[in-house]
Image (cartoon, rainbow, N blue to C red):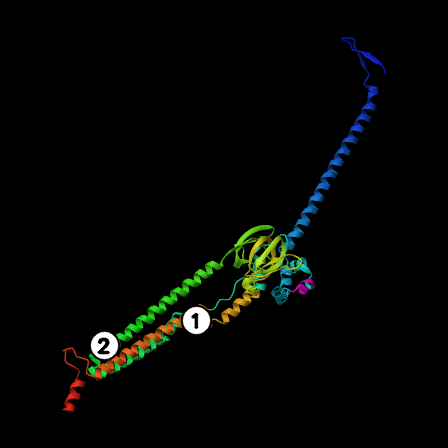
Amino acid sequence: MPLRLRKHDHSPILDPEPLVPAKRRWRMAFTVIYFSRLLLSLSKKVLYEQTKLLRSLSYVAIQVDDDNPSRDHASLVNIDQNTLSRMLKEKNHHSLNQLGGLMQVAAILQSDVKKGVSGSEADLAHRRDVFGANEYKKPPAKKFLSYVLEALKDTTIIILLACAILSLAFGIKQHGPKDGWYDGGSIIVAIFLVVVISAVSNFKQSRQFLKLSDESSDIRVQVVRDGRHQNISIFDVVVGDLVSLKIGDQIPADGLFSDGYSLKVDESSMTGESDHVEVNGTTNPFLLSGTKVTDGFGFMLVTSVGMNTAWGEMMSSISRNLDEQTPLQARLNKLTSYIGKVGLAVAILVLAVLTIRYFTGNTRDDHGRRNIMEVRQRSMMC
């Protein structure tokens, strides 16, 4: 490479002419490296955009399935509720095995043995429409007129009313309408007050009893919905709910044992037996409403609610026999009847004594004179 000297300082410098091809090669290499990196960056960006687009499309597809649950709800309508209810009431292992066991029953009810039902308002409302609410039919409350008629059916009231009518008739005949109605009218007014007061008292007591009964039956239960524990009213339990049970809890509906440890229940309210029954997933997975947990803890899958449960069937049979008296009512009515009979006997005895005294002349009027019957007898004897 030739050297040239500068004029002012005579320093050697390289001749730039031979370096032109080298610069071109370096520039070409730099351009290749730069464009390769640019293409690599663009390819990564395009790949990222495509991946993002695919992810968003899959997410939208899931949302569409969730927003259109009509197909899932339609399958609930095809479930034979009578089969599930009868299986629980009879504790039929064969029917449970035919349905495929606990997991298959949960799948049929569109529930999960770990997370429970979805818990959405639409799903809960549909389950209540298909399987019914967890409430029991109550007999209609008696009206006030019914208590009035019951009070008038009392034997003592009937006798007093008959005597009041007779007294009213004889009083009017003897003293005229102006003054003869006092005795009989007074008795009728007294009977009216007794009947009204008795009816009002019984009516208020019945209303208070119904109110206390509703408050005492509205207990809180813990359920698992969409994997979250919630405290709800026993009346809000639906088929498919996963209910948490612990010592002292009342079982809110009929269902199957899902999971737990050393769970025992008291079924004396249903069977009359005082022995505690162990519930597990192999020998006895059946749980009946109205029974109570006495030991252990666990979870149950609700299969029947309300009137479809064993407790609901028993309550309906009780409501049909409302006219039958309880042993306490029978004893009280017997005591009341006995007191009424004793009072009637005493009244008849007093009437007989007064009648005898009247006809024997041992009675005196307001002026101290003996009864006129005795005077007449003596005058006739003379």
- Residue in front for this viewpoint, 111 or 54: 111
Give the answer, above or below, for where 159 lies relative to 82. Answer: below
User: What secondary structure is marked by label 1?
Assistant: helix
Residue 54 visible somewhere in the drawing: yes
Residue 5 x/y as whole percent:
80, 10
Q: Is residue 141 visible?
A: no
Question: Residue visible at 73% across and 38% down?
Answer: 44
Say which mark, if any, is on residue 330: 1
Q: Nearer the viewer, residue 38 or 2?
A: 38
Q: Is residue 231 left or right of residue 338?
A: right
Position of residue 154 relative to residue 49, above or below, is below
Task: Determine which residue is flagged by label 2.
Answer: 182
> From which residue to which does the magenta span run?
92-97
Amino acid type of the residue that numbered disc 2 sits on in the rendered structure: Tyr
Image spot of residue 64 (x, y percent): 64, 54
Nearer to us of marks 1 and 2 is 1
Q: State yes or no: residue 94 in magenta.
A: yes
Please name the residue shown 70% across and 42% down the image.
49
Which amino acid lies under the numbered mark 1 shown in the image of this protein? Answer: Ala
